[in-house]
Image (tube, coloured by chain):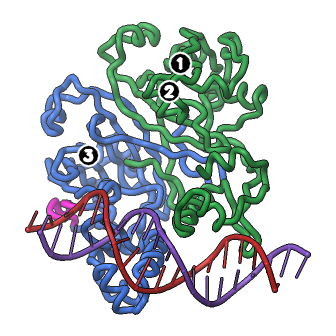
Chain colours: A blue, B green, C purple, D red
Amino acid sequence: MLLSLIDTLPEGAALPPERELAVRWNVARMTLRRAVDELVIEELLVRRHGSGTYTTRPKVARWLGMIGFSEDIRRRGMRPGSKMLEFRHQKAERAAARRLRIPVGDPIIAFTRLRLADDLPMVVERTTMPAAYVPGLQAEDLNGSLYDLLTTRYGIDLISGTSRLEPVMPDAKTASWLGIPTTQPCLALHGVSFDRRDRVFEYTSALYRGDRYAFTTELRTTPTPRADAKGL
Amino acid sequence: MLLSLIDTLPEGAALPPERELAVRWNVARMTLRRAVDELVIEELLVRRHGSGTYTTRPKVARWLGMIGFSEDIRRRGMRPGSKMLEFRHQKAERAAARRLRIPVGDPIIAFTRLRLADDLPMVVERTTMPAAYVPGLQAEDLNGSLYDLLTTRYGIDLISGTSRLEPVMPDAKTASWLGIPTTQPCLALHGVSFDRRDRVFEYTSALYRGDRYAFTTELRTTPTPRADAKGL
DNA sequence: TAGTGGTCTAGACCACTAC
DNA sequence: TAGTGGTCTAGACCACTAC
């Protein structure tokens, strides 16, 4: 019954309150909750304490290990935001071409966004991708999750990636965007994402506020290997 | 209470019936069951319908995502090294006791080591563990891999852990150990490791040279949906 | 402060096991 | 068939959200 109900709702919509559903379906609230528990584990629903229970985004493109900023912030119980700082069409110079595995001079799109969580600046993110992969992409399209956009508009799923973390000092411009002094160390994350055809789809360099954004890993040897932050 | 009880039982032993434990601990049976549920998920217990609930037998698997410094350096094709900077027996103050989940005042061992790769300083690592877990441990034993030592001498496998990464500036002493200026940002890694009994076995704080030691992750959405380097 | 999810209770009956 | 885990009930109160 829950699944049928979810089917009738748009993504992100609130379910009726647990008490109401329990009465409607003539079960105890605890019983209803156990059913909801299962769908929460399957990530079809998310609970927000004191607020409600909500449907999630479509399952096709659901990031598992690999999630974007927006989704990650949501899972942390905050509201993601985005502010476009720069958006440009340009030609790939040598470094970009090598990273993206395209010919020098091919058109690329490069943009820089300030990403926020509950309106607080968290990270400055610069993304570069071949223009041919995202025809018609406009700056205005990028005020939310890039991954969602790729999936919904272009039917593209980024299925793997590599990234590297390093500590750096921010330059003056980045520091002012993030609202921190230039003396405060940040975490730089450089990464590439691949799509199903093993194309390098995008290259990202991001500078995170180290004081606000904790990178954590959970490691387990059995039964299902969980993550692999080399160096542990 | 369940964890303590499990500690007293051999592997594969039956727990007392749920109804009995609920009465003994003065909770509703459903409440007890929820606690058992958690340990079943963690694979410390298994249920057998109509029969009972049992402690599990040790797991087969070895290190996957979780490897120590020595092993990691070897995999990178370098020669690991270690230099003891400090080694002390002391009593757990409140913070340490809470982290290690032991009573305040219990004896602990704390040591700080400089770890090298091909004789170059890479990281200053401070480890704290309950003294009772490693009887007879001497500073001289710790010139190599701690994990190897735990396995070979004490028969202990650390099977899971969590860690957190953040960018920090080194203090003067640490900077001089690492051979860097105090103006160069480093990566701090704070982590705990658990053994099979879900005991917190050790707590580590490490400061890595960001310029020499790259933290990388590889993420894949398929086939095993577990990887979870938050923030990627 | 009203409304939401989060947790717990004390009891009932079902399903399965071990004999 | 006695004893075990599995599921459900109807209610209570707590914690958090959104206003």
Q: Considering only vertical position in the picture, is B85 above or below B167?
A: above
Left or right, residue B10 beside residue B37: right
Foreground mark, 1 or 3? 1
Highlighted magenta segment, given as a residue range = A137-144
User: Does residue B187 show up?
Assistant: yes
Assign the C terminus of chain A to one quadrant of the image: top right
Q: Which mark is residue A120?
A: none
Residue topped by disc 2: B104
Q: Amino acid at mark 3?
A: Glu
Q: Position of residue A117 (x, y in %)?
A: 22, 51
The percent position of residue A84, horizontal first and vertical second, equals 15, 52
Residue at 34 percent of width and 92 percent of height: A24
2 and 1 marks in contact (CB < 8 Å): yes
Q: CA distance from mark 3 to mark 2?
A: 44 Å
On whether residue A84 falls in the magenta region, the answer is: no
Image quadrant where residue A174 sits: top left
**In the rendered structure, which amino acid carries the disc numbered 1?**
Lys
Q: Is B6 displayed left or right of A35 in the figure?
A: right
Q: Which residue is mark 3?
A: A125
As helix, strand or loop, the secondary structure at mark 3 comes to: strand
- Residue drawn at 46 percent across, 51 percent down: A161
Which quarter of the figure has residue B23?
bottom right
* Residue that badge 1 annotates: B91
Chain ID for label 2? B
Q: Position of residue A44 (x, y in %)?
A: 41, 74
- Could you say whether the residue bearing mark 1 is in a helix, strand or loop? strand
Front one among B8 and B225? B8
- Amino acid type indicated by mark 2: Val
